[in-house]
Amino acid sequence: MGKKKVTPQSNDPKLQNPSHETHHPSKDSTFTKSSNPLSRQSSIEDPKEKLQNLKSLNSLLVKEAFESRQQIESLAQAKEALEAELSEKKKLEAEESDKDVSFEFQCELFSVYTGTQMLELGVEMEKMIGDLKRKVNGLMGSLENERERLSLVYKERDLVRKDFELQVNEGKLMKEKLMEMEENQRKFVQEVGKLKAEYDRLVREKDDLEKVKSLIMKDRDLLQKNMNDAAEEVGNLRRENEKIVREKRGIEVEKNEQRLKIDEMEKEMREMNEVISSLRKGDGILRSKIFELENNYCEAMDREAERAIEIGALATMVESGDRQRRIEKLLDKIAAAGRVLEMNENELKDMHKQIEELSGYKIEIEKAKSRLEIENIELHNKVIELKNVVQKLQEECSDHQKKKIELISEVSCYQELVDQVTLQKDHALKQLDGEKHNGVNLSSEVTKMENTLKKTVEELARKEAEWRNVIKGKEEMESHSRSMAEDRDRLHKELLEAKRSFSDLKAKMESTTINYERASTLLENTASLLCQFKAENNGKSKEEAVVAEQKLEDEIEAYAMKNWKQSKRHLRTKRRWLKT
């Protein structure tokens, strides 16, 4: 009975997960422990209850037997599925072994291919390096030849420069001589022109002098008339000047009187200002007294109110005679305070009246002050007008005096001009005779200078042609030297590019060798990882081992494909670069 009761409790979880094993001895022990208390209870209970328990146990046993049969069937099915999976796994392992063999074969082929490619690349690189060395040697030889040529060119250039400098110096000397000749010619032409102009001017002056004589005679008559008129004007101006002096003296007298009036008014203004300041001081004192009286009045009113309160309080308590005396004393004090208040009110009224009188007096003073200021301004304006009149009169006097001096100077100038004209006439007649002789000599010198100028112009044209030829030769030499310098720079650039390409090839070869070493190390690592993985997965379940092996194979294949593609790309780029 105990063994039959153990089976249903041990088989319930196996129905939920049929992949696990069926028998668990720990669960059997728990069921036996639970059956022992039932047997103890059955011995104690009635026989009816025992029958019911037996019936229920029988039904449970039937159910457990049915469930155990179902579990056995499910376990048989699971066993068949596991056998099928094991057969599939064996097939997969066989396929994987074939794949490993093919992968190893591919790796060997890849290593052989890479080795051959590396050898070919090494041979090609050696050829390229030899060609580059030959080119570099040829370039160096051409550079040395070019340097020798450049040294010869520089020597020729120095000689040409020296010749050019000598020619330039000769040209400068010729230019200086030409400039001197041109300047002498210009001076000669200018002198001839001046002499001609002076001759014409003297002839004109002779004609003009005759005209001037007649004009001077007329001007002399006019000057005499003008002198008489100027004398009359001077007399009139003197009279006007005397009148202006008298008016000026009268204006100064009036000005002094007005200054005295202004001083008196200023004194009155000072007195009024002093009175105003004293009134302001008295006004401040009165205001302070009024403020004190108002304070006293307020204090008295407060005291009166306090005493009225005391009287009201004492009126209720008029029982004793002492209180009546106090009340009488308080009434006397109140009467005295009222008298003091009346006195203060009278004083306040008097002070207000004084303030009103002072304010009226102050207003009158301010009006008088403003009136005096207006009068002062009017007097000041009159003084300014008188000053302007005096200045105008002085300016007119000075203008009349200047006119008088100018007229006298004009008369003296006209007299001097007449004397100078007579002297110049005599001197011009003498110079005319001398200039006639000089004109003949100058004409002969001019012909000589013209002949020398023609010769110098021809020599200058010849020198300019030679100088232009020298400049053309210099430009050709400079262009040749520039082309040589450009060729040298170009060869230097080609040499640098060849060195760079050689260094790039070397770096790429090193990078390819490093990549191949990395690929070989990765393949070795993957092989070792596969071995380790197989050794580790021998103890695990077959399904997990299959899944893990598939994942690892996928990762290895992806990584190997990446490396294979990268190596192909590197090889293609290297081939293209080598072709170019």
Image (cartoon, grey):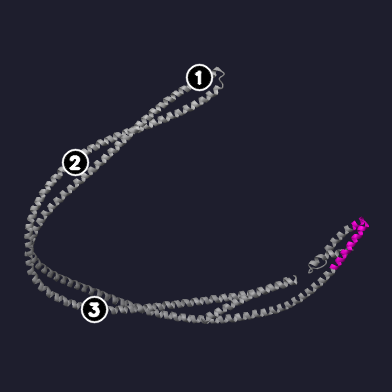
Q: Position of residue 73 (x, y in %)?
A: 83, 71
Q: Position of residue 123 (x, y in %)?
A: 55, 82
Q: Nearer the viewer, residue 361 or 153?
A: 361
Which residue range is magenta in the image? 39-67
Label 3–label 1 contact, CB within 8 A: no
Question: Can the viewer see residue 288?
Answer: yes
Identify the disc placed on residue 328. Answer: 1
Q: Residue at x 53, y 81 (%)?
A: 578
Q: Position of residue 410 (x, y in %)?
A: 11, 56
Residue 552, above or below 227: below
Q: Position of residue 163 (x, y in %)?
A: 29, 77
Mark closer to the chain start, 3 or 1: 1
Q: Nearer the viewer, mark 3 or mark 2?
A: 2
- Count of labels shown? 3
Q: CA distance from mark 1 to mark 2?
A: 86 Å
Q: Amino acid at mark 1?
A: Glu
Q: Nearer the viewer, residue 52 or 133?
A: 52
- The secondary structure type at the circle numbered 1 is helix
Q: Amino acid at mark 2?
A: Glu
Residue 58 highlighted magenta (yes or no): yes
Q: CA distance from mark 3 to mark 1?
A: 151 Å
Identify the disc placed on residue 461. Answer: 3
